[in-house]
Image (cartoon, rainbow, N blue to C red):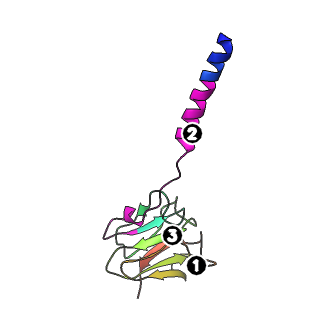
């Protein structure tokens, strides 16, 4: 009986640790993108921590974001474009203080650069 009680207590402790580890989903919050920045999320819409890019004229995305963009936000005073194949193909455009929680059809996980446009 004592052995069964110990085994049951151990099983319950393990279950509690597992539930605490995986029980809560990643939060989604557009407010994680600071003002004055363009931000990229690889999980949409706005799930997890974004990569912040400041307000660049043009730059390639970081390796972890290449062809992974699922949502993005423009919290600057300029218009920004997401590009595929460098600057040869505009995937999406956001005006100042705009955001996109889900990429438009055919554009998800394709962006490799970001820059001011328009």
Question: Is 16 displayed left or right of 114 in the figure?
Answer: right
Percent position of residue 81, x then y: 46, 80
Question: Is 44 displayed left or right of 106 in the figure?
Answer: left
Q: Which residue is mark 3?
A: 71
As for residue 62 lying within the magenta part, the answer is: no
Percent position of residue 22, x then y: 56, 44
- Mark 3–mark 1 Cα distance, whole angstroms, equals 10 Å
Q: Which residue is mark 1?
A: 104
Q: Earlier in the sequence, mark 3 or mark 1?
A: 3
As for residue 18 lying within the magenta part, the answer is: yes
Where are the magenta residues, as a range?
10-38
Q: Which mark is residue 19?
A: 2
Seen from the viewer's position, the closer of residues 18 and 93 is 18
Badge 3, how many Cα within 10 Å: few under 14, some, many 20+?
many
Residue at left offset 53%, top offset 52%: 25
> In front: mark 2 or mark 1?
2
Quadrant containing the N terminus is top right
């Amino acid at each position: 009986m004592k052995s069964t009680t110990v085994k049951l207590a151990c099983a319950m402790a393990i279950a509690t640790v597992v539930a605490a580890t995986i029980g809560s989903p990643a939060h989604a919050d557009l407010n994680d993108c600071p003002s004055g920045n363009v931000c990229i999320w690889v999980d949409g819409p706005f799930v997890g921590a974004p990569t912040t890019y400041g307000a660049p004229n043009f730059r390639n995305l970081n390796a972890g974001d290449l062809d992974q963009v699922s949502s993005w936000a423009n919290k600057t005073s300029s218009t920004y474009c997401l590009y595929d194949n460098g600057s040869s193909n505009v995937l999406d455009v956001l005006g100042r203080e705009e955001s996109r929680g889900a990429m438009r059809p055919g554009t998800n996980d394709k962006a490799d650069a970001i820059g001011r446009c328009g």
